[in-house]
Image (spheres, helix red, strand yellow):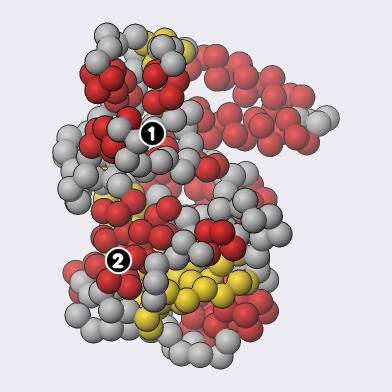
Amino acid sequence: MQPRRVLVLGGTGTIGRATVRALVSRGHEVVCLVRHSADLRDPSGPVACARLPSGAAARFVDVTDPVSLACDGFRGERFDVLVSCLASRTGLPDDAWAIDHDAHVSALEASKAAGVTHVVLLSAICVQKPVLAFQHAKLAFETVLTASGLDYTIVRPTAFFKSLSGQIDRVKRGKPFLVFGDGLLTACKPISDDDLGTYLAECLDREDRRNRVLPIGGPGEAITPKAQGERLFALLGREPRFKHVPVALLDVIIAILATLGRVVPALAAKAELARIGRYYATESMLVLDPVTGHYDASATPSTGSETLFDYYARLIRGEAFAERGDHAVF
């Protein structure tokens, strides 16, 4: 394993921190570019910066400004690898194109000037069926990256633990577990932050992961929302209780918000958030078979050791805390 000089985007998020830990533990010299923040409560601000693993350096930049990226971030120095765990916070169109596409394009250009030869990009498996603005933005940058002439590794994880943990407090308060339809509409192979961070760090030394787009999930079989609820109730020692929400209700909400959004821009944004919710309520986070149009759990690779239900148990025991942020499903 050859130590490298690595520049990391998005290193203060939960997955970013796990990736930085894995990189530092492998002996790499890691510099994290951190978004400016005037609010210390912001997870991308100085408080989160202080949580970076020992051995990783932080530089504050405006990732939407190519000049700041070059001057405040790269500083005319040489780097070997760019690793990006950066993602838009909301998924709304303006945010998505500014961060998931434009900021990455600027970072790619600065990386070329800095001597970077390999880019490791954390993307998302949902871009294989793009409907939403942030999916199109991510996919557009993937296209730019693959045509850049640099070695690349594009990692598309299935689902994150933090995105599937929002109902624990609800169920602990005696409320039913919410599912769309019968709770069997979708499935995923969720992966932990540490398992994903390790996988991303390993990409620096794995030739078989160069110039490839790699879907990845966590260990075990694919899990439906119903199975998530059943196991959660079992961990709490309670009988399962579900509340079934019809997908048609989301369609009605989207239609109303979109109509009102023509007059009130804030409601247009809520309509897009509702579309995002509907997408995740009806589409599995698994490899999509382009021939059949069906999701294929058996074709979705697995890695790591921690399961979602291991994580649920740790949350219930108070041994972990779910930093759900803007990317929560519920």
* Residue 243, above or below 38: above
Q: 108 or 201: which is nearer to us?
A: 201
State the image coordinates of residue 73 (x, y, percent, origin top left): 57, 79
In the figure, is residue 182 to the left or right of 105?
Answer: left
Disc number placed over residue 164 in the picture, else none: 1
Q: 37 or 304: which is nearer to us?
A: 37
State the image coordinates of residue 247 (x, y, percent, origin top left): 48, 17
> Which residue corresponds to mark 2?
22
Q: 189 or 60: which is nearer to us?
A: 60
- The three-letter amino acid code for the residue at tag 1 is Leu
Q: Are marks 1 and 2 in contact (CB under 8 Å)?
A: no
* Rendered residue at 42%/74% (across/down): 56
In the figure, is residue 193 to the left or right of 139?
Answer: left
Q: Nearer the viewer, mark 1 or mark 2?
A: 2
* Rendered residue at 48%/83% (across/down): 112
Q: 117 or 308: which is nearer to us?
A: 308
State the image coordinates of residue 251 (x, y, percent, origin top left): 57, 19
Disc number placed over residue 268 in the picture, else none: none
Q: Which of marks 2 and 1 precedes in the sequence?
A: 2
In the figure, is residue 49 to the left or right of 39?
Answer: left
* Residue 204, above or below 254: below
Q: Residues within 10 Å of mark 1 (few under 14, many from 20)?
A: many
State the image coordinates of residue 9 (x, y, percent, origin top left): 49, 67
Does dot 2 land on a helix, a strand or a loop?
helix
- The three-letter amino acid code for the residue at tag 2 is Ala
The picture quadrant where one finds residue 4 is bottom left
